[in-house]
Image (cartoon, helix red, strand yellow):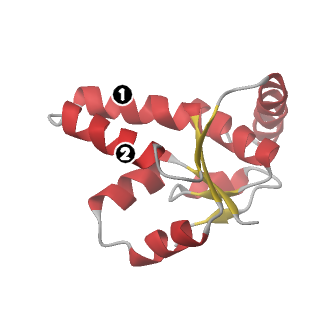
Amino acid sequence: MIRVCLDTSAYSRLKRGGENSLQGLLEKADEILVPVTTLGELHAGFHLGSRLHENIQELEEFLAQPGVLVVPITENIAERYGVIVKRLRDQGTPIPTNDIWIAATTLETGARLVAYDRHFHQVSGIIVESP
């Protein structure tokens, strides 16, 4: 089973179009997981932009596709979050808070993270795809 977790950067690239390799990866996936943190970042961007209703409609259509699942924050994800924060602080390589939540969700679900932010590579155990 191919399971991928979608970061905000990947969703944004997908919606801009022209990303055949990204589209191909997502088409091969059995499950596309969308962390609730990714949804929050997307909605923030939508509200700050000029295409609020169109963007929300596109997101709702994307989320309604078979195999696309929204992943809420659970107690296990919260614990992983704490471990990642400590590890990154000890290494002196902090990353944005929301991306730590996305990394924790990815690790807890056993998925590969689809993202274009290089700092995810600093999180131990995470497999990052940047097609």
The amino acid sitting under disc 2 is Glu
Q: Nearer the viewer, residue 120 or 111?
A: 111
Instruction: For label 1, count other residues whose C-alpha is less than 10 Å away and answer few (under 14), some (14-19) or many (20+).
Output: few
Instruction: Name the residue at the left extreme.
Output: 50
Disc 1 residue type (three-letter): Ala
Judging depth in this view, the residue of 66 and 22 nearest the camera is 66
The location of residue 102, given as percent across then percent down, is 63, 40
Q: Would you say residue 96 is visible in this rendering? A: no
Residue that appears at 76% across and 25% down: 74
For this view, does 34 lie left or right of residue 84? left
Q: Residue at x 57, y 58 (%)?
A: 118
Q: Looking at the image, can residue 114 be seen?
A: yes
Q: Which residue is mark 1?
A: 44
Residue 84 lies, in percent from the top left, at 79, 37
Left or right of residue 64, residue 115 in this image: right
Q: In front here: 91 or 36?
A: 36
- Whether 11 is drawn above or below 130: the answer is above
* Front position in the image: 6 or 88: 6
Q: Quadrant of residue 57?
A: top left
Marking on residue 61: 2
